Amino acid sequence: MNKQTILISIVALIVGLGLGFVIFNGQMEMPSVGSEEKKISYWVAPMDANYRRDKPGKSPMGMDLIPVYEENSEQMASDDPGFTISANVQANLGIKTDLVTMQEFTPLIEATGRLTYDQNKISRLQVRTQGWIEKLYVRTVGENVKKGDRLFTLYSPVIATALGEFSDARKGKSAALKRLSKGRLIALGLSEQTIQQTIKSGNLSQAVIFYAPQDGVVTSLGVREGSIAAKNTIAFEITDPTNLWLIVDVFESDAADLKQGAHTQIIGQNDDIYHGMIDHIYPDLDPVSRTVQLRLNMTNPDGVLRPGQFFTVNIHGDKEMSLIIPRSAVIRLGTGNHVMVAHDHGRYEAAEVELGKSSGEQIQVLHGLKEGERVVTSGQFLLDSESSFTGAKLRILQRSPTKMDHDSMDHNMEDMQ
């Protein structure tokens, strides 16, 4: 056998072995008949379940699309409610759940309040007849005054005449005339202090001095020195700042739960905490903001609090046992509220819920869930989109008939008879 024949035989042997290896390896990799390997149904964006494609790619946010696999025949035939998603999709969506619990619950209304002066602590000095302001002892708004401090002097011919009549009546023997003449001075706006000081000075035809009726701060000044004061002019307004009102705006939806005397926690801008009770609930509703106002008293003996300051007000309700879920689990829609209920083996179901009061990050569930169920608190909006896409039905729990329902049914039966 020559060298050429030997070389050809060696090459043929190598080619034969290679083909055999390829065929054997291909048989090993071929899927067996009846394999349960899942097929990819579509690709979805991790942050937008409505963005779907039939091949891999990038989402509008630049993230890799996630494969969603077809359900196998056993899952497709299942009568379980809701829909199923694979474990890797759950991980990519960042799904988190929390337990539905029955616990003691204290409703909390969060509102905002603004400090104002106590309207019961305001005194107004009114000029009740035309006169001239000869002198002002207090010239600016915001000045502090004490009861009995001089405020201004007023000359009025009418007051001068009335003082003369009172002086003459005091010299006479008629007690009735004395009472009538003094009553006229009081009707003209003169205080007892002004009357006595004027009589004591003997200058009945001169200007009279008006004095501060209480301690406080000047919150309004309606006259100027040397000017004419018309009849019924409010010359001074003096307010006692040692007690203030906190006017709180509460949304219409929370107004039904307000009670006079309810405990409140008041938090200032520097996290200063005060406590108070609801003193008054105003009957009207603001047509623009759709809020109801309520009033709280806040003592201010050291003058630290100032009208115009804003506070956060937490109004606590009565404790009660309730089903509680996190507020983050609720999907609020125009047609109602619902949550995503998490079942075993990656199955989820949309459930309609009726909500009650809230407190911080918790909210009361009146109807639609059972104790011990789990609700989705993160990723629920993507699951809700998936639920709508797959046509999964919304779970609506039937209410237990109430006594009123039974009475209505009995009444209807009587009408049919």
Image (cartoon, helix red, strand yellow):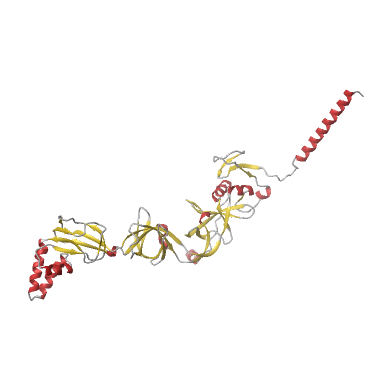
Q: How many marks?
A: 0
Q: Quadrant of residue 17?
A: top right
Nearest the eye: 242 or 121: 242
Figure check: 2 above or below 61: above
Where residue 270 appears, as percent x and y from the top left, is 41, 58
Residue at 10% x, 69% y is 166
Q: Is residue 271 left or right of residue 135?
A: right
Q: In this rendering, does residue 280 appear at all?
A: no
Residue at 15% x, 68% y is 197
Where residue 195 appears, as percent x and y from the top left, is 15, 68
Figure check: 146 above or below 223: below
Where residue 263 appears, as percent x and y from the top left, is 41, 66
Q: Quadrant of residue 239?
A: bottom left
Nearest the eye: 152 or 390: 152
Q: Is residue 166 left or right of residue 262?
A: left
Where residue 23 appears, as percent x and y from the top left, is 79, 35
Q: Quadrant of residue 198?
A: bottom left
Looking at the figure, which quarter contains the N terminus?
top right
Nearest the eye: 100 or 313: 313
Q: Residue furthest right?
A: 1
Nearest the eye: 329 or 411: 329
Q: In this rendering, does residue 243 appear at all?
A: yes
Figure check: 221 above or below 25: below
Q: Is residue 45 left or right of residue 255?
A: right
